[in-house]
Image (tube, rainbow, N blue to C red):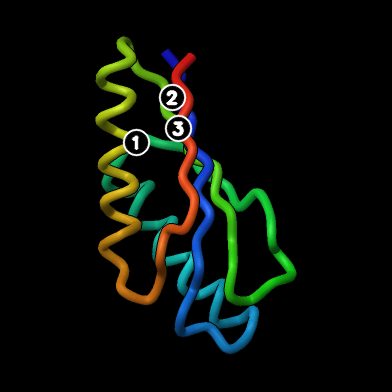
Amino acid sequence: MVTYAEVEIFLYECHSLKDKRSILKRIKNRLQKDLNIALSELDFQDLWQRTKFGIVTVSESAEIGDQIIQQALELIDFFTEVERTVTNVEIR
């Protein structure tokens, strides 16, 4: 099963694209290190206080895929300098 999430994030402490890249790199590294997922920035590359991630995992069941995505969302919430504003999850 493939589980996919689109996550829009507001970055509070960013004052430049350089700050944004630094924070996003930390989030990406942590997610990829702790969970077996693929992720990419999908939108808002030119805005320094907003981003949109696509997160994907492949698992043997929808339940496991959903658990992994939920863990990824919890890890994103762990970072105090960002706030998830919109989250959409699909299981296929």
Measure the C-alpha gap from mark 2 to mark 3: 7 Å
Residue drawn at point x = 38 percent, y = 76 percent: 81
Measure the C-alpha gap from mark 3 to mark 1: 8 Å
Q: For mark 2, does the 10 Å Cα neighbourhood hold few (<14), some (14 to 19), or many (20 or more) residues?
A: many
Look at discs 3 and 1 and give the one toward the viewer. Answer: 3
Contact, CB < 8 Å: mark 2 with mark 3? yes
| Residue on which disc 2 sits | 3
**Type of the residue with mark 3:** Val
**Quarter of the image holding residue 16?**
bottom right
Extreme-front residue of the structure: 85
- Disc marking residue 89: 3
Q: How many marks?
A: 3
**Quarter of the image holding residue 57?**
top left
- Disc marking residue 69: 1
Please state the horizontal and vertical placement of residue 2, each as a whole percent of the image.
46, 19
- The relative height of residue 11 versus residue 78 in the rendered view (above or below) is below
Q: Quadrant of the N terminus?
A: top left
**Type of the residue with mark 1:** Ile
Nearer to the camera, 58 or 13: 13
**Type of the residue with mark 2:** Thr
Measure the C-alpha gap from mark 1 to mark 2: 7 Å
**Quarter of the image holding residue 72?**
top left
Residue drawn at point x = 48 percent, y = 65 percent: 25
Contact, CB < 8 Å: mark 1 with mark 2? yes
